[in-house]
Image: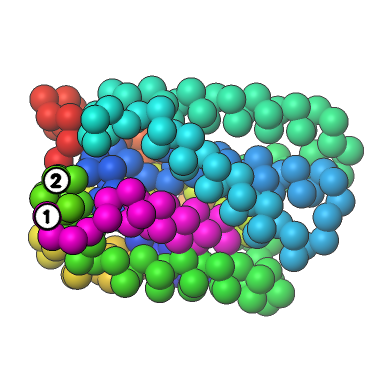
Amino acid sequence: MGMLVGGALAICGCAVQGVFRNPMASPYVIGISSGASCGAALSIVLGAPQAALPPAAFLFALGSAFVVYALARVGGQVPVGRLLLSGIAVSLFLSALLSFIQYVAGERQLREIVFWQMGGLWSVNWSKLLLSALPICVGALGLLGFSKELDALAMGEETALDLGVEAQKIRSIVLSFASLATAGAVCTVGVIGFVGLIVPHLIRLIVGPGHRHLLPFSLLGGAIFLSWMDLLARTVIAPSELPVGILTALFGAPFFLWILRRSKKSPGW
């Protein structure tokens, strides 16, 4: 499960950065993870069966992604500042909604939601693995087929149109696949932030900006990264287990600030 979730979050981050032509984009930063969290938490409180969690998480994640994109877009560009502000605004709204869901939840449901929000692999079993594997694999494999289109979008919307790439259509499809894979990850292990931000940047330094190599290596790198983080989470305060989402946040927040400092002079790549 650690490899599935890490790979999914990393390849989604890579694809979302390509779609927005923005180094700050990731499922966590632009609200996809928050949307998936609200959908899954609402499903838990309503007493829906386990199989209902991925569809609910997917619908909320997809809605969040398109709202952030619509708010941040300016003339075909997605500036860093507008992206961050839009993502923060949508995430705050979803956090308020999630707080309301927790308020009306029962004691058992509240405990489940609180631990699930921390992000961890301790509750994974084979049934949960099989449940999340399908949306993750469909979303990740779908993203792997759009390397050429993402390379075209990286050169600008007008250039992409000249190359025969329908920018709006491709963005919608890529965001849908990214939301599906993120929802499959979040609904099982909770919110694990910054994997989709850290890994694609590190991989880009190694293999370059071409998405033909960047997407699959981000998938592999994310799987390795989260597996290592989970191993560290299991040993740092052994015999207790630290939620892996706390560790990724401790690593990711300084990394996020470093990227923000690097990109402050440029609205995109």
Q: Is residue 226 left or right of residue 128?
A: left
Magenta region: which residues?
Answer: 162-184
- 167 magenta-colored: yes
Please tell me how crowded label 1 is: few (under 14), some (14-19), or many (20+) other residues with Cα within 10 Å. Answer: few
Q: Which residue is mark 2?
A: 158
Residue 15 point in image, percent of width and height: 32, 55
CB atoms of marks 1 and 2 within 8 Å: yes
Camera-nearest residue between 232 and 174: 174
Residue 216 point in image, percent of width and height: 28, 71
Q: Which mark is residue 90?
A: none
Residue shown at 72% from the left, 44% from the top: 41
Q: Can residue 80 be spotted in the picture?
A: no
Q: Quadrant of the N terminus?
A: bottom right
Q: Which residue is mark 1?
A: 162
Up/down of 124 relative to 100, above or below:
below
Up/down of 233 relative to 20, above or below:
below
Camera-nearest residue between 129 and 168: 168
Residue shown at 39% from the left, 36% from the top: 69
Residue shown at 36% from the left, 66% from the top: 143
Q: Quadrant of residue 74?
A: top left
Camera-nearest residue between 266 and 119: 266
By secondary structure, the bulk of the magenta-drawn segment is best described as: helix
Where disc 1 sits, the SS reads helix
Tell me the CA gap for discs 1 and 2. 6 Å
Up/down of 134 relative to 169, above or below:
below
Q: Quadrant of the C terminus?
A: top left
Please tell me how crowded label 2 is: few (under 14), some (14-19), or many (20+) other residues with Cα within 10 Å. Answer: some
- Three-letter residue code for mark 1: Asp
